[in-house]
Image (tube, rainbow, N blue to C red):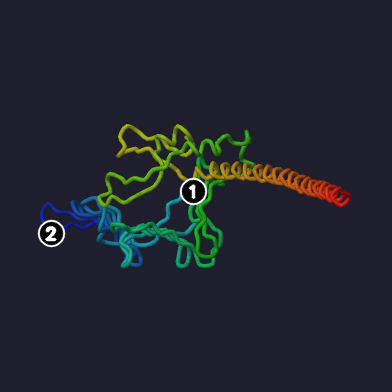
Amino acid sequence: MMLFAAAAVPNASFAQVKIGLNPTAITPGAQLDVESVANTHTVVMESGAVGINTAAPQSYLDIRGTTKILSQTGTQTGVIWTGTSNMDGVEISAGAGDCWVGIQRRGGAPLHLSKPSGTIEHSFAIFSVDGVPGGVGAILYDGVAGVIYNTTSDQRLKENIHSTRFGLEALKAVRVYDYNFKSDSRKTLSTGVLAQELHKVYPQAVTVGGADEKVKPWQVDYSKLVPMLVKSVQELSDEVELLKKEKAQLSAELKLKEDAYAEFGKRLTQVENMLNGAENTKSVSR
């Protein structure tokens, strides 16, 4: 049934398209209201706000229920919502007991990443470049009570592999300082390097900044220094092994000299005894 009705008020009008018992009401200067069989509403308010499953939208787009945004057809399920009693922010969930992401609004609130209980070595986050499926790194749960931070290092993905020149000599050139940040009113002591200095020695660990240090400061990835530390320890270990060999050789040479000296001492004693014996024989003969 289609029903058009005019209000009794002059210059006012009202239109309604009714399918069964559920009308779609169009009120000029007011709103568009599409009512479903379950008496839920999809409305377009005069202000431009759109409400889905609610007749009183509280924002420009107010959706009460699950939301799905797909680039193609599929059977994925999920929900995105905001304004819970214990989290004033946004939570994206695939359903009760499943993984979810929560972003709280209040100051100092963290970003929550959650997996179902029993999940072992599943990624909480995967970092990808150019859509590479495996990604360039990931954050995982270790199955106990820790977090694993991984950087992709698969040999099959690498080429031009050769021993690094960044070792002990490069490490010795890295200068370490104590300092505090100017923005820290408490003057908290920190220990680290200066990005501009480190860039001259080991640029792989430095992200070059811009002209304005507050907008784009120079930054250091301290984890990038680990390979150089490993190489330095290996070089120190080689030096220690060499010193051990040299010490063993010197100890052996010293032992030979000590043995020779002891043998010389024994022979000297024998000679002295022989000379003393001969002297005594001469005295008796007289």
Q: Is residue 245 above or below residue 210?
A: below
Whether residues under marks 1 and 2 lie with C-beta atoms below 8 angstroms apart, the answer is: no
Q: Position of residue 189 (x, y in %)?
A: 33, 50
What kind of element bears circle 2?
loop
Q: Residue furthest right?
A: 285
Q: Position of residue 156 (x, y in %)?
A: 64, 42
Of the two numbered discs 1 and 2 on the same chain, state the one appearing first in sequence.
2
Q: Position of residue 170 (x, y in %)?
A: 51, 36
Amino acid, disc 2: Ala
Q: Quadrant of residue 181?
A: top left
Say which residue label 1 marks. Answer: 72
Q: Nearer the viewer, residue 218 or 81?
A: 218
Q: Quadrant of residue 63?
A: bottom left
Say which residue label 2 marks. Answer: 8
Q: Quadrant of residue 16?
A: bottom left
Q: Position of residue 145 (x, y in %)?
A: 50, 64
Report whether 98 appears left or right of 182.
Answer: right
Report whether 233 appears left or right of 58.
Answer: right
What kind of element bears circle 1?
loop
Residue drawn at x 61%, y 40% is 157
Mark 1 closeness class: few <14, some 14–19, many ≥20 residues within 10 Å: few
Q: Is residue 258 above or below residue 76?
A: above
Task: Select label 1 or label 2 by which is in front.
Answer: 1
Residue drawn at x 59%, y 43% is 236
Q: Residue furthest front?
A: 286
Please identify the quadrant where the N terminus is shown.
Answer: bottom left
Marker count (numbered): 2
Q: Nearer the viewer, residue 158 or 37?
A: 158
Residue drawn at x 38%, y 37% is 218
Cα–Cα gap, marks 1 and 2: 48 Å
Residue drawn at x 46%, y 47% is 71
Amino acid, disc 1: Gln
